[in-house]
Amino acid sequence: RDALGSLGKSRAKFISAEETTGVTFDDFAGQEYIKKELQEIVRILKNEEEFQDRGIYCPKGVLLHGPPGTGKTLLAKAIAGEAGLPFFAANGTDFVEMFVGVAAARVKDLFSTARSYAPSIIFIDEIDAIGSKRGGPDIGGGGAEREQGLLQILTEMDGFKVSTSQVLVIGATNRLDILDPALLRKGRFDKIIRVGLPSKDGRLAILQVHAKNKYFRSEIEKEVLLQEIAELTVDFTGAELQNILNEAAILTARKDLDFIGREELLEALKRQKGTFETGQEDSREMPEELKLRLAYREAAVAVLACFYPDPHHPFTDTDILSITSKPKMRYAEVSGRAFARKSDYVNSIVRACAPRVIEEEMFGIENLCWISAKATSDASTRAEVLILQTGMTAFGKGYYRNQSDLVPNLAAKLEALRSEYMRFAVEKCSSILREYRSAVETITDVLLEKGAINAEEIWDIFKKAPRIPQPHVYP
Ligand code: ADP
């Protein structure tokens, strides 16, 4: 083995190599279940032979997805650190260049380097830059080039033999939705882990990790202050929380003080998030009626999410709803991922109707506005996908639009079935929202009062709310 030191410079500038990262799972706070899953992988990596004797192999690829700054890179490094393996990192955007062939060549380089140090870890950040769906709109340009790179990744991963000392590939993205499904197939990135925004307890734990090397007047004061900051930082990422503490330390030094105090922390919090402040102000400046509509919309979406939990994106205590013009809750992504049954598709259509249904219910059909438009077209598209592409409906096998000349009256048949699904979805959704009217109202009140609510509180309200029985809705 050569020393890794010279590697980065000599052959491939885009690869950063570390013989050992020195990062451990203790450096990542909150979301304990993620660590548990990854610890399992580390155990397999460390005792490969013992596990192989029992027929257990390490996954070839792990995909971490979630917003930037939530600690995906940190987790990847922790896996390498805990397993004591060399770490080779690259960024998806580095692969995509103007020159033809560069992407594939760089992928090859990365893998062959990592393989020569196997067992080792490859980390590809922003893997969506190279691994987005093929054949989609080519927004950034360089489509063919990207495709070559993606194919090369697939080839490399398929080429690994599971039985020999292996290379574990960790990918990170905040755009799981645009990844090419081929990447997620078995034997590639078949372990998908969501790294979400931290809950209140998670935020406190993260603050505690990053406060370790900082000076406070006393342990008790430190605890009280961090508690307060954790309360005030709904929607903040780990990276942002770390910045708050660093900024507070700088302010403290600038004022020539010995200890970080409340004033410095609050000042740092303000600075950290222009958007935190403006976010608050935005919602204050928002016209009352718009605020009310947005709060009802989020509340309706939340109730539907509790009623039909999304198997692919379970609604957990790291999810937070707040009043902004962008919807916060995601709907089920029904294609390209794990196993989805017909009922999952249908439930996702029902869920997607919530914004429109609640708006009509509360404000009247004459007073609908743009805020539910996106959801409405989303519901309709879901119905179309179910009918045309899944082969799970009376339409039988998948038909595609461009076959319309082969199938007589295709458009009319499609339309009839689509409107039937939509009718059912709207009725079902209305019925659920009427049954849980009291939960919708309570969540709306909390949103209006506090501006945000997390999944834990929502579940609590949903479970405890009195229900108004509704007649059964039949498909
Ligand atoms: P991502 O890769 O998801 O964009 P990073 O891993 O680069 O995020 O996070 C940046 C920094 O933020 C980390 O190095 C770490 O210091 C801090 N951080 C983020 N999430 C956490 C967490 N859950 N626990 C502790 N520190 C965190």
Image (cartoon, grey):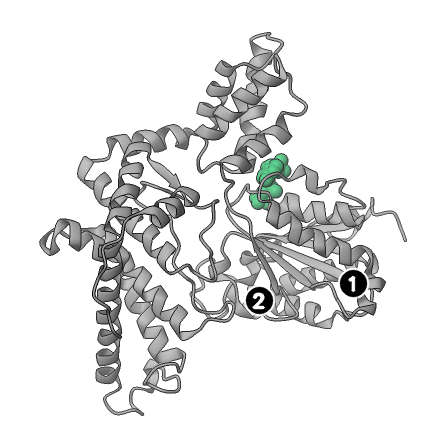
Residue 119 occupies quadrant: bottom right
Residue at x-position 36% and y-position 74%: 385
Mark identifier at residue 166 = 1
Residue at x-position 40% and y-position 48%: 459
Examine the rendering and report whether any part of residue 120 can be seen.
Answer: no
Residue 458 vs 110, above or below: the answer is: above
Name the spot of residue 357 as percent of width and height, x first.
21, 57
Mark identifier at residue 439 = none
Reading the image, the residue beneath label 2 is 184
Residue 377 vs 219, above or below: the answer is: below
Name the spot of residue 132 as percent of width and height, x first.
52, 62
Is 280 left, or right, of 200 in this rendering? Answer: left
Residue at x-position 24% and y-position 84%: 413
Image quarter in which the C terminus is found: bottom left
Task: Out of 343 and 149, give the one closest to the viewer.
Answer: 343
Is 353 left, or right, of 251 in this rendering? Answer: left
